[in-house]
Image (cartoon, helix red, strand yellow):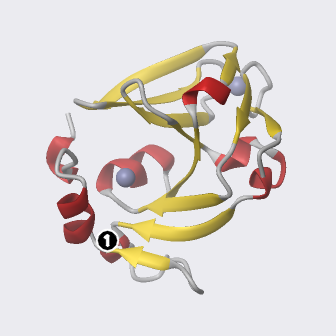
Amino acid sequence: MSALQHGRCLCGAVTIEAVLAPEMGACFCDMCTRWSGSAMIGVDAEAETVTVRGPVKTYRSSPFAERAWCDTCGSNLWIRDDGKQYELMPGLFPNAGGARLTHVVYADRAPEGWNYAGEITRISATDYEKANPFVSEGDMP
Ligand SMILES: [Zn+2]
Ligand SMILES: [Zn+2]
C-alpha cells in the first residue's frame, strides 16, 4: 500500500496526492466530533509524500494542531500536528486508498446509537490522554 493516491475535495478545487497508511483510525473526541459532524476518521500520510494544490483554509484547533478544509466547498481535508504527518480525510480518496478502519480513540465518548462494530481496537479517552500527555479534550478554544 505504498502507491501514490490521488484525492480531491467535493468541488475539485483542492487536489491531494499522498502515500496513505494501510490503517485508519476514528476519533470521538469532542473536537473531532464537532468538526467532522460525525466520528472523524483519519488516515496517516508522511508529510514528504503529501502534495496539496488549491484553496486551503486552516484553523488552529489545539495549541499543537491545525485542521484544514477547502475554501470553496468546505470539504474537510486534514488534521495535522505542527510539522508532523498528516491525518487526511479518507473520503477524499477513491476507496479510502484501500485503508482499513482498525482503531477508535475516545471510544467511550461515542454516542450510544452511533459507534463502530466489529474487530476494532477501542481506546478510551483516559488511556489515549495517558499515552499522549500533550493532548487534552479541554483544549477547545
Ligand atoms: Zn472544494
Ligand atoms: Zn479527536
> What element does badge 1 sit on?
helix
Q: Quadrant of residue 4?
A: top right
Q: Residues within 10 Å of mark 1 (few under 14, many from 20)?
A: some
Residue at the spot x=41%, y=24% of the render? Answer: 83
Q: Quadrant of residue 108?
A: bottom left
Residue for badge 1: 109
Residue 90 in view: yes
In-image side of 129 versus 113 (left or right): left
In-image side of 29 versus 73 (left or right): left
Q: Amino acid at mark 1?
A: Arg
Q: Quadrant of ligand 1?
A: top right
| For residue 119, above or below residue 103 | below
In-image side of 94 versus 49 (left or right): right
Residue at the spot x=41%, y=77% of the render? Answer: 122
| For residue 13, above or below residue 10 | above
Query: Looking at this rendering, what residue extends furthest in the bottom direction?
Result: 118
